[in-house]
Amino acid sequence: MSNLEIALLSFPVLLVLIFARMPIGLAMLICGFFGNWLVLGRFTPILAQMKTLPFTMFSSYSLSIIPLFLLMGQFAAHGGMSQALFRAANGWIGHRRGGVAMAAIGACAGFGAICGSSIATAATMGKVALPELKRFGYDGGLATGALAAGGTLGILIPPSVILVIYAILTEQNIAKLFLAAVVPGVLAMLGYMLTIAIYVRVKPEASGQREKAPMAERLQLTFEVWPVLVVFFLVVFGIYFGWFTPTEGAAIGAAGTGLIALLNGGLKDGALGQSIRETAVATGMIFLIILGAGVYNSFLALSQLPQEAATWVVEQGFSPWMVLAVILLTYLAFGCVMDSLSMILLTVPIFFPIVSGLDFGLSPDEFAIWFGILILIVVEVGLITPPVGLNLFVINSMAKDTPMIRTFQGAAPFVASDIIRTVILAVFPVITLFLVRWLY
C-alpha cells in the first residue's frame, strides 16, 4: 500500500473512531501516530516527535490568547452581562412580532463580542432567554432554533477562538482577521432577525407578543450595558489600532470583565473558582484537539497528500470558483459529524495549499483573510446542523419539553439564512475586505 493510499484510508478510520464516541482529539492522535508508523515502517521517529511536540506546540505565545478569551467569557457570564444585554435588546424590540427571539439574537451578538466561544454563548444566553421565550408563548422549535443559531455568533463576531487558530495555521494577522469578521458578523445577526420576522409571519402561532416598554425604561436598560461596550471597544479597537497585541488585548479583556463581575457581586459563592475550572477544562479540551491535529497533519504531510491533492487540482484545470464551491460544500458535510475546531485543524492544512495557488483576483494576504471568513461561516453552520450540531444539543438540553426533532426543524430556516449569506460573501469578497483595506 502506497503512502498516499494510507493517508486516504485514514479518513474513514478517523470517522469510524469519532462515530464510536472517541474524543476527536484522541482519534486524530491515534490515526496520526499509527499513520506515521505505517509510512515510516518504525515507531522511533513518531516517539521522538511525541517527546517534543506537545511542549513545542503548547509553549507558543499565540495560543495563550485562547484561555484568556475563554476566561473573559466566563467572567462576563458570571458578572450578569448576558442578562443586561438581553434586557436591553428586549426593551427596544421585544414588543414586535417575534421581537423576544430577535432580542435573544441581538444579545447573543453582544455577548459574542466578549466571548470567543460559540457553545459558551449558546449555553449562557439559553439560560437567560429561554425562560422569557417560554413565558411569552414562543414555539419550542423556534425558541431553541433561534438560540442555537444565535450562539454561532460567538465564533463569528470577534474575538473568536476559531479565527485565532486559523491565523496561527495560515500565519495571518489576527487583528486583520478580527476586523474582516465584523461586517459578516453583523450580516449574520441581521439575517437571523429577518429569518425570525419571516418565520412568525408564516406561522403567527409560533410567537407571542409583549407590551412596549416605556422610553425611560429602555434608556435605563441601555445604560446598564455600558460595561460590555467598554470592554468590547477597549479590546477590539485596542488590537486594531495597535495599542496592544491580541494576546495583551485578551488579558486586558479578561481582567476588565473580571473586575466588572467582582464589582457586580458575580464572583461570590465560589464563582471565581468555577470560572477558572471551566476555563481550564475547555482549554484542555481544545489543546488536546490541537495536539491530535498536529500529529495527524504531520502524518498527512509525510504522506504527501496535501501536495498531491494540490497538484491534482491544478492539473484538472478546474476553475477557481468550482474548487472553492466544492471545498465549502465539503465543510458543510463535515459539519454534520465534526465540531468546528476539529474541522479547522484537520482541513486547513490540506485545503489552504490547494486554493492558495488559484487566482481569485486578490492578493495572497487578502485571499487568506477572505477564505478564512468563508470557512468560519460554513463551520458555523455545522454547529446547527444534525446529527452533531453541538449548539442544538446544548440548547435542547435546557428545553426539556421540546423534542430534539423540533429543535432540528426550528434551526432549518437559520441554516438557509447562513447558506444565502455564504453565497453573497463568496461572490462579493469586497464585503469582507473593505474594512481591512480602509484601515490598513
Image (tube, helix red, strand yellow):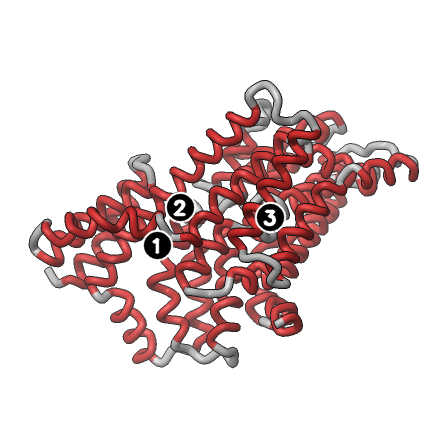
The kind of secondary structure element at disc 1 is helix
Extreme residue in the front direction: 243
Residue bearing mark 1: 346
Residue ID at (35%, 54%) = 346
Depicted 39 relative to depicted 273: above or below: below
- Taking the image as shown, residue 265 lies to the left or right of residue 160, namely right
Between the C-alphas of marks 1 and 2, the distance is: 10 Å
Is disc 1 surrounded by few (<14), some (14 to 19) or many (20+) residues within 10 Å? many
The image quarter containing residue 209 is top right
- Taking the image as shown, residue 37 lies to the left or right of residue 73, namely left
Q: Nearer the viewer, residue 241 or 39?
A: 241
Extreme residue in the top direction: 269
Q: Quadrant of the C terminus?
A: bottom right
The image quarter containing residue 307 is bottom left
Residue bearing mark 3: 153
Q: Are marks 1 and 2 in contact (CB under 8 Å)?
A: yes
